[in-house]
Image (cartoon, rainbow, N blue to C red):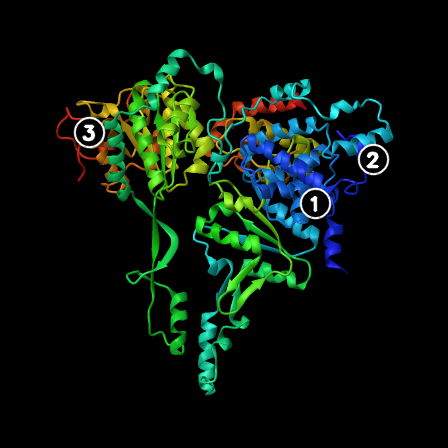
Amino acid sequence: MNDEAKGANLLGSTEAIQAAFRERGYITDRSIATAVFLALQLERPLLLEGEAGVGKTELAKVLAASLGTKLIRLQCYEGLDVNTAVYEWNYPRQMLEIRLLEAKGQAEHASAHDIFGPAFLIRRPLLQALEASADGEPPVLLIDEIDRADEEFEAYLLEILSDFQVTVPEIGTITAERPPRVILTSNRTREVHDALKRRCLYHWIDYPTAEKEYEIVLARVPGTPSKLAHAVVGFIHRLRGADLTKVPGIAETLDWAAALLALGANDLNAAVVDETLGVVLKYEEDIRLVRGDATKRYLAEVAAGS
Amino acid sequence: MRDPAIAATPRGEEINGRRLLGEAVLFGRELRNAGLAVDLGAAVDFGRALAIVDVGEREQVRAAGEAVFTRRRDDIDVYNAVFDRFWRARRGGWVDERITAEKRDETAAPDDTPGEAEPTPGDERLTADQDRSGIPIPSEGEDDAGPEDTPDALTISPDAYSKFETLRHRDFDRMTPAELRDAERLVDLLEPRLERRRTRRYELHAHGRRLAPRAMFRRNLGYGGNLLEWVWRRQIKRPRPLVVLCDISGSMERHSRLLLRFIQALSAASTVRTESFVFGTRLTRVTRLLRDKDRDRALLKISDAVTDWAGGTRIGESFRDFNLRWARRTLRSSGVVIVVSDGWDRGDPRLVAVETARLRRNCHRLVWLNPLAGTPGYQPLAAGMKAAFPFVDDFLPAGTVASLERLGEILAGVRTEDTRRGSEAAAHVRGLNGDADDAAPPADWPPKAARVPNPDPTMAQPLEPRK
């Protein structure tokens, strides 16, 4: 089967992307699907920004699953360098090899090629992603939380993301046969540099509408009673409007629904909410603000609204 | 929103690629005029995108343009406003009018008049849209391409101006030669002394303290695997980022200006990452305004952007705004925060305390410059100052450059025993939230901020040199 055709057939339109994602429990709206569609068609990296817990990383996973291809993930952190992101030579093994050659009495005849060959190269995620497309469908490369990496690494990424090639001095240039599908995510703890953004398509993932989020809860936490799902989503949406240090994301909604399900709750009431508030709110100030009277007020509002 | 005429067009067949590109470039220019950093590459991408999405469907076209043209969240509102206008002006289609017109003739859509496709400048719908969008669109696009450009001061309410305020804010950008000299001297004084933070990156260095195994193996391959040469590395150090929060209400203006000048010169001259905010009744981010190469114009812009000149000070609300909206983006825990304020606050002192405590938890060091602190016998009795005082790491007078030399020492990381971080602040907040007793001073009053026993009670404590 022709790989090109396969990829195109699977996700050849925004509708197809939405359907394929939905099948895997990821409910998207039109604008996300369009951004993914364009990234695939134009073969451009896609930079996803959004608050924590809106499903940025999950999108990459679902995309890989939908395309039936491998997901290669690079988690960024400060100090991430070429040796941990791209490649490294396996020095201990090279040492052994030299000793071995010496023992065999071949050391004089050996050349640099014998120990700086592909066998001694440790492939880190970025190199893996470039090489993986050689055997079929290009993989999905997830560069997670790029804002945590420092500027030096960002600058290095520029080269890789525009040419999809890596130069290993001892071996030469390694070029991807077909560029991997790249998803970058950022939590905006700092602003990603413009030069990097220029090479990417950009999408800001917002919190979903209540209806969408309700669907997400049902898809992700199977067995949630409809009434409970409505109440949870309603309450969360009310919380997002409140003046909190950290408003809950979709991840918190799902955790909460799962927690309530585990507790056997069929509906929300003030006591249950107070008990489980720690699943939703992660700051003491926020919990203190919401617990008690505010909870009762929000519940009443949600009940009135639905 | 699908136009029947366009829906009848088989996608991508009759639509001339060059026409689409033309439209894309035109749209790109509109966005550029509206202040987005749009380059030709993005317009070309959009042209390509139009060829593969359904150009009759508004949401798809909108989302495609958003993916291609926007680069940050704050762009999205501006983008949507421009898109709305452009889309309506094009009568909901991204194809050439002639094609549409032909199609229209063929399908004879009943309610279409040919003239509608090209609105004249006086077109009512166009102006109506502009009014409706309601988003102040920044006027200059080119300057805005800085690396961290979130539009500053987007919320400008014209009603906030009055003659009096204009008079007052004009003072802000004018500096006496003496003040300029002071600011420059401050930079010379402070820049080389900024405290540096160890990063997680290493460099090879002969005097490093850690072995660099990777480089060492590499270098010793030539010796047949015997580790003869040892290679060392050390951590790279960088100056800590600085965030200044400047009070610009009446009496504070002059001092804030000095600090802003300082930040301005600092960010121009070095690699120190700086962020600046001004506050009166509300917080305004001025980092990018301050980057203007013309330093006087930068201050002028700031004074134009800020609307709360004569409104008094709300320290609590401003800090809260900073903590919620900006702290995560501009202040990773390694930063040093400098507040310039006299602590006269019209808001709730409890809010000031809570938010100052939070601010301090989020930064490496919180420095408070108060011009009044230089006067003999000063005690932080202003409500806001009193509330914030327990959480301040370093409390300094902010009169002249001479008194700011202490700031240099602090930024350079010279310090005495640091006993007040964390636990004490937490205890204080608990006290506030339990039985709040505003009248009684905190248990440790006068605070230990000075950290050195003060032999002369008539002197302001912070002036005392540290051991």
Give the class, few, some or many, for how many residues have Cα within 10 Å of label 3's Cα (few <14, many ≥20): many
Position in image of residue A169 (x %, y %): 48, 66
Q: Residue furthest top?
A: B163
Give the class, few, some or many, for how many residues have Cα within 10 Å of label 2's Cα (few <14, many ≥20): few
* Residue B246 seen from this side: yes
Of residues A56 and B2, the one nearer the viewer is B2
Q: Residue furthest bottom?
A: A105
Mark 3 and mark 2: Cα distance apart in space: 81 Å
Mark 3 and mark 1: Cα distance apart in space: 64 Å
Mark 2 or mark 1, whichever is nearer to me: 2
Q: Answer left or right for A64 relative to B462.
A: right
* Residue A223 seen from this side: no
Q: Residue at x 25, y 39 (%)?
A: B188
Check disc 3 and report the residue beneath it: B461
The label shown at residue A21 is: 1
Position in image of residue A89 (x %, y %): 48, 68
Position in image of residue A280 (x %, y %): 55, 35
Report the amino acid beneath label 2: Ala
Q: Residue at x 61, y 19 (%)?
A: B131
Q: Answer left or right for B133 relative to B154.
A: right
Of callouts 3 and 2, the N-terminal one: 2
Both marks 3 and 2 on one chain? yes
Chain letter for mark 3: B
Quadrant of the snapshot with the N terminus of chain B: top right
Residue A136 falls in image quadrant? bottom right
Kind of element beneath mark 2: loop
Position in image of residue A113 (x %, y %): 50, 76
Chain letter for mark 2: B
